[in-house]
């Protein structure tokens, strides 16, 4: 019988994973399912729904640090930091409209699981370059913490970066700490149209070599 497990905190998440491991039952880990159409369909009997793990744990604008639960909508996070003149510099893209779903459905956990980024990745990096710390549950149902809440944190193994882009196959993130940056006061976008392949490559190379 298929079951949907919806934990409300790290302890309940740990219990769910321990049960699945003991019963040798694979789990599909989901948040809002905004990226469900990507890749091959997952064949599991049970679903671990992390949408109940939502909310801001701590936000310190002066320290450029934000700690949130993994099921928090990324749109809410972007709105929060924008209200303090800050931003997520890796510009996580919204797959919703591209995959036929409403905009603004993605979660923080999904962004990190997919290691999302936007056009500024060449300069600002992807999601993995902006994660400072993480609380997660391993496949054996063990809670672990890695990283911290400061930018210059060099203690221990850099597990949070390793988990970014793993699509939930290595561990279940429950709480994450992200680095935020001051937003630019002004910005401009240039659109160059009707270029053939050679000129498009030339334009891209010039852009990559610029300060922008």
Image: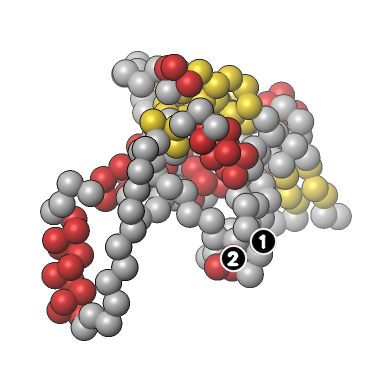
Q: Position of residue 94 (x, y in %)?
A: 53, 56
| Residue that label 1 marks | 102
Quadrant, the N terminus:
bottom right
Left or right for 92, reference 103:
left
> In the rendered image, is residue 179 in sight?
yes
Graded by Cα atoms within 10 Å as few (under 14), some (14 to 19) or many (20 or more), the crowding at tag 1 reads: few
Q: Secondary structure at mark 2?
A: helix
The one of 96 and 168 positioned closer to us in this rendering: 96
Extreme residue toward the front, this view: 186
Residue 76 lies, in percent from the top left, at 62, 39
Image position, residue 85 (x, y; %): 46, 31
Q: Nearer the viewer, residue 47 or 92?
A: 92
The residue under label 2 is 97
Q: Nearer the viewer, residue 58 or 154?
A: 58
Q: Residue at x 31, y 42 (%)?
A: 124
The residues tagged by marks 2 and 1 sit, at their Cα atoms, a distance apart of: 6 Å
Residue at figure coordinates x 56%, y 47% from the top left? 110
Residue located at (44% from left, 38% from top): 88
Rendered view: 107 above or below 193:
above
Q: Residue at x 36, y 21 (%)?
A: 151
- The earlier-in-sequence mark between 2 and 1 is 2
Tell me, yes or no, whether the two marked residues, 2 and 1, touch with CB atoms within 8 Å: yes
Residue 83 image-quadrant placement: top right
């Amino acid at each position: 019988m298929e079951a949907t497990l919806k934990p409300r905190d790290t302890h309940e998440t740990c219990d769910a994973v321990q049960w699945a491991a003991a019963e040798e039952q694979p789990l599909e880990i989901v948040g809002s399912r905004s990226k469900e159409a990507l890749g091959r369909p997952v064949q599991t009997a049970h679903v671990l729904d992390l949408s109940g793990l939502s909310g801001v744990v701590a936000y310190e604008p002066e320290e450029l640090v934000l700690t949130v639960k993994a099921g928090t909508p990324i749109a809410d996070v972007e709105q929060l930091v924008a209200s303090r003149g800050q931003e997520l510099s890796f510009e996580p893209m919204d797959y919703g409209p591209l995959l036929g779903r409403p905009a603004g459905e993605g979660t923080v956990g999904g962004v990190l699981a997919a290691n999302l980024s936007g056009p500024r990745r060449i300069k600002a990096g992807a999601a993995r370059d902006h994660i400072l710390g993480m609380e997660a549950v391993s496949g054996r149902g063990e809670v672990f913490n890695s990283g911290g809440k400061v930018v210059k944190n060099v203690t221990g193994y850099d597990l949070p970066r390793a988990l970014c882009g793993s699509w939930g196959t290595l561990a279940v993130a429950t709480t994450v700490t992200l680095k935020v940056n001051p937003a630019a006061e002004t910005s401009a976008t240039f659109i160059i149209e009707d270029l053939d392949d050679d000129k498009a490559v030339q334009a891209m190379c010039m852009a990559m070599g610029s300060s922008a």
